[in-house]
Image (cartoon, coloured by chain):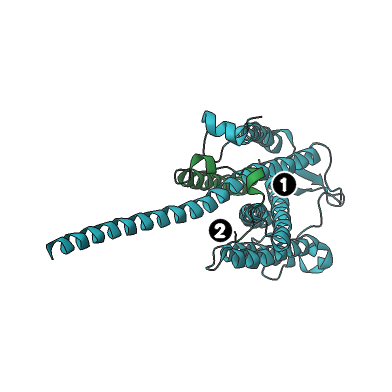
Amino acid sequence: MTHVGYLVAGWGSAFLIIGIYTWVLIQRGNRLAKRVPVEKQRWMSARDEAERIGDA
Amino acid sequence: MTTTQEAVETGRFDTATGSRTTRMLGWALSIGLIVLLWLAFIATDPDIRIDAASGDEIGQFDAVRLIYVHVPMAIVAYTAFTVTAIGSVMVLLRRSVWWDLVAGASAEIGAVASALTLITGSIWGRPIWNTYWRWDDVRLMTTLVLFMLALGYLAVRRLEGSAESRARRAAIVGILLVINSIIVNRSVEWWASQTLHQQSTITDAAIEDLTLFTFMYAIVFGLAGYVWLLIKGFRVAWLERQNERFGLVEALEQRRAEAERTDAVNAAVDTGTGDQS
């Protein structure tokens, strides 16, 4: 196989960056979920769809 | 299907952002990744052709395997910014919270994907063009501008100000993202002489058979990954919003309770003083 170094760098950077982003995203979600009541954690379409930006 | 209320009652929230859908999609993506790696590195052949004049071997050789990650990243970035732009229009027209959160989550993924487009493209460019980067290359520069604009959009979302003005400002930048995506995509045709980048691999029918299948598979895999991240990102953004609201309500309740306690103590002191006099 030719260009092994480039293949490792290209695919490796993609795995690394997407992996870090996914891990950070999930950790952020877990941290925030501890501070929000469980019944308020998920989007509930019927009630929440009426909400508009700036509503108190 | 389990509703949110049922999930709350039965305690079936597995994680803060996880659900049956994301779990199933996650498993499918894990298996899909193994298939992608097998297709990209084992099943497909390197790009080797014979030059008719000299009889020498020419082509991209194994460096061609980088397009299975580079092109899907670019397509994910375009898709993500298109969704951000649609969300931005909905924010401006309807002040929709749902679309605002979708737009923000999608732009985050778009920023990651456009960064990876630049990184993997530069790495691919070194063996093919003999350079990592050229400052006068239209395709490279417009992609860099797109990435910077995405960072700008995410920065605007975090500026000080009311939720409404913040969302409106971000929405305007969000619409620019899709305009810039079109410029990036068309740049190889509009300014063909000012870029090293090849024209569209798909529309030029430059690849075929298993290479074409792997290429398309990698794009579908990338888009499925985008959907998974978008669902997760939306749920995190929703939690952030809820945390801001409930954090504020909690702080107000604490202040109110403190004020009531202080009033009660003052009243007790006043009563005690009154008794003595």
Q: Which residue is mark 1?
A: B64
Q: Residues within 10 Å of mark 1 (few under 14, many from 20)?
A: some
Q: Which residue is mark 2?
A: A56
Res B196 visible: no
Q: Residues within 10 Å of mark 2 (few under 14, many from 20)?
A: few
Residue at point 74% right, 36% down? B44
Compared across the picture, whether B58 is left or right of B277 comes to right
Res B172 visible: yes
Q: Chain coloured cyan: which letter? A: B
Q: Secondary structure at mark 2?
A: loop
Q: Quadrant of the N terminus of chain A?
A: top right
Chain A tint in image? green
Compared across the picture, whether A32 is left or right of B170 comes to left
Q: Secondary structure at mark 1?
A: helix
**Tag 2 subunit:** A
Q: Position of residue B186 (x, y in %)?
A: 81, 62
Q: Nearer the viewer, mark 2 or mark 1?
A: 2
What whole-number distance in Å separates the C-alpha atoms at marks 2 and 1? 53 Å
